[in-house]
Structure formats: C-alpha cells, structure tokens
Amino acid sequence: MFAAWCDLREVIPYAFGYMLAAKVGTGIVAELGAMRISDEIDALEVMGVPPVTFLAATRLLAAWVAFPFMYLAAVGIGYFASWLAVVEQIGDVSSGGYFLIFWMFQNPPDLLFSLIKGMTMATAIVLVGLLLRLHGLRRTGRRGHGDGEVDGSQHRARPHHRNDGNAGLLGREPASAHRRLTGVAREPVRLELS
C-alpha cells in the first residue's frame, strides 16, 4: 500500500524534480554561462534579437514538449522498481498479491495530479536556470561585480598560452583571450620554419 500511494503521489514527482534540477538545470546554467563568456548573447543583442525570447522561450517550450513523456516513463520505472523491491528483493508477498493491492489504490486522477506536480516542478527548475542566469549576468555585468554573481570566466581553467595563435581551451585564440581579460591587445608570435 505504501508503494501504491507514495510512489505516484510523492516519491516520483520529487525524485523527478531532483534529477531534473541536477541534470537539466545545471546544464542550462552552464550552457548560458558559456554563451555569455563567448559573447554569443551579446551578439544576439547586437543583431536586435532579444536573448530572453530567443534563448529562454525556446528552451521552456522544448521542456514542456519533452518532459511529460519523460515523466510518464519515470512513473513506469518507479512502478517497476517498487515491484522489484517488494516482490523480488524482500519476497514477503507474491506478485499477484502485490498487483492486487497496488492497482486497488491507483486511479487516473492521481496520475493526472502527479503529472501536474512534476511539470510544475520542471517548469520552475527550467525558469530559475534560464531567467536568473540571463538576467543575473545582465544585471551584474560580465565580471560579476555587484551582487556576488560569479561569472565562469573568473574560475575556469586557463590554457597555457603558447603565443602561436592556436586556439585555446575554449576555442579562443590566446591573443583575444588576453585582450578580453586585460583590455590590452597582444599580437601572437609568428614562428618561421628554417
């Protein structure tokens, strides 16, 4: 009975939210941070494309399209894991007895409310990752001065500058990375083969 009531109503929505925050939420923040560092968001603004609409709305729409199906798959996996733990691992009840009690306490409105709960958490996680990252970087600037917002460029691993104009760790030339960080242009040293 615990598996029938708690899996669908509480355990699966919260586990889905935690996993979504860990995987999707951090991925969105990292992707937008990398876009801000490489000036892609500034390029959108220069072209007249509103970055919040272009970056945030499309990702939120994609989340609304994909996550209900992922959530229903998570419900199926949760049901199977409960059956596996109760019937096979603990072994105190037969498979038929488990399914009899399990399906007695399930009804379609519970699945609908569980889906609504999971999608509400998913929407909140995606919005927090999108809007706080986009607006936070715009509000505090690129270097993170102000409200304690930390930009990834301050803490990322820096490549060893080889002074030969080859791309650095994140695809930038060392000369442009030096100019971006210090404001001073530095010409790469050209090596001639003899």
Image: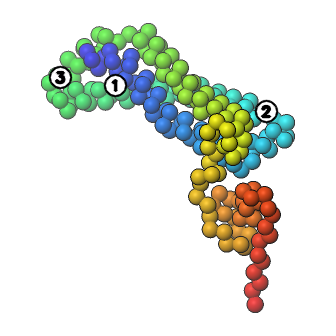
Q: Residue at x 84, y 41 (%)?
A: 46
- Asked whether 113 or 23 is in front, the reply is 23
Q: Is residue 51 visible?
A: yes
Q: Characterize the local packing of mark 2: few (<14), some (14-19) or many (20 or more) Cα atoms within 10 angstroms.
A: some
Q: Which quarter of the figure has residue 182?
A: bottom right
Which circle, 2 or 1, is nearer the viewer?
A: 2
Which circle, 3 or 1, is nearer the viewer?
A: 1
Q: Which quarter of the figure has residue 162?
A: bottom right
Q: Residue at x 50, y 38 (%)?
A: 23
Q: Marks 2 and 1, how far apart in space?
A: 43 Å
Image position, residue 49 (x, y; %) = 81, 35
Instruction: Identify the residue position indicated by label 2 in the image.
Output: 50
Q: Quadrant of the N terminus?
A: top left
Report the number of numbered marks: 3
Q: Residue at x 74, y 69 (%)?
A: 165
Q: Is residue 74 above or below residue 175?
A: above
Dot 2: element: loop
Image position, residue 8 (x, y; %) = 38, 19
Label 2 amino acid? Answer: Pro
Label 3 amino acid? Answer: Ser
Q: Is residue 75 visible?
A: no
Q: Which circle marks residue 79 in the picture?
A: 1
Instruction: Identify the residue position indicated by label 3 in the image.
Output: 94
Q: Is residue 122 left or right of residue 181?
A: left
Label 1 amino acid? Answer: Tyr
Dot 3: element: loop
Dot 1: element: helix
Q: Is residue 95 left or right of residue 113?
A: left
Q: Marks 3 and 1, how far apart in space?
A: 16 Å
Q: Quadrant of the C terminus?
A: bottom right
* Sequence-earlier tag: 2 or 1: 2
